[in-house]
Amino acid sequence: METNLTYSEAMKQLEEISRNISSGELDVDQLASKLKQAKELVEFCKQKLQAVEADVNQILSADQQ
């Protein structure tokens, strides 16, 4: 996976994978590869969201002090 990937780019890649799977364009070998890639992208997005949530919580708690 790209090291400089953004959340938006990861979501676009996930959308593309979803379209490919839904359309039936992929053979069995491609399907396995794309599902693995999708799993990695989902994990990346989860980590990004958790990091943003932590940042927001830190900012909000600093404002309350």
Image: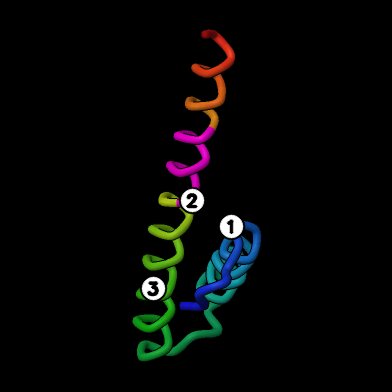
Distance Cα–Cα, label 3 vs label 1: 18 Å
- First in sequence, mark 3 or 1: give its number: 1
The prevailing secondary structure element of the residues shown in magenta is helix
Identify the residue at horizontal 44%, vertical 60% (top origin). Answer: 44
Question: Foreground: 21 or 2?
Answer: 2
Identify the residue at horizontal 43%, vertical 68% (top origin). Answer: 38
Residue 25: quadrant of the picture: bottom right
**Residue 51 circle label:** none
Q: Which residue is mark 3?
A: 35
State the image coordinates of residue 43 (x, y, percent, origin top left): 38, 58
Distance Cα–Cα, label 2 vs label 1: 7 Å
Q: Nearer the viewer, mark 3 or mark 1?
A: 1
**Residue 7 circle label:** 1
- First in sequence, mark 2 or 3: give its number: 3
Question: Foreground: 44 or 26?
Answer: 44
- 33 part of magenta stretch: no
Which residue type carries mark 1?
A: Tyr
Q: Is residue 36 left or right of residue 45?
A: left
Callout 2 crowding tier (Cα within 10 Å): few <14, some 14–19, many ≥20: some
Q: Are marks 2 and 1 in contact (CB under 8 Å)?
A: yes
State the image coordinates of residue 46 (x, y, percent, origin top left): 42, 50
Please state the extent of the stretch shown in magenta in the rendering. Answer: 48-55
Task: Identify the secondary structure beneath mark 3.
Answer: helix
Task: Identify the secondary structure beneath mark 2.
Answer: helix
Q: Which residue is mark 2?
A: 48
Q: Is residue 36 left or right of residue 1?
A: left
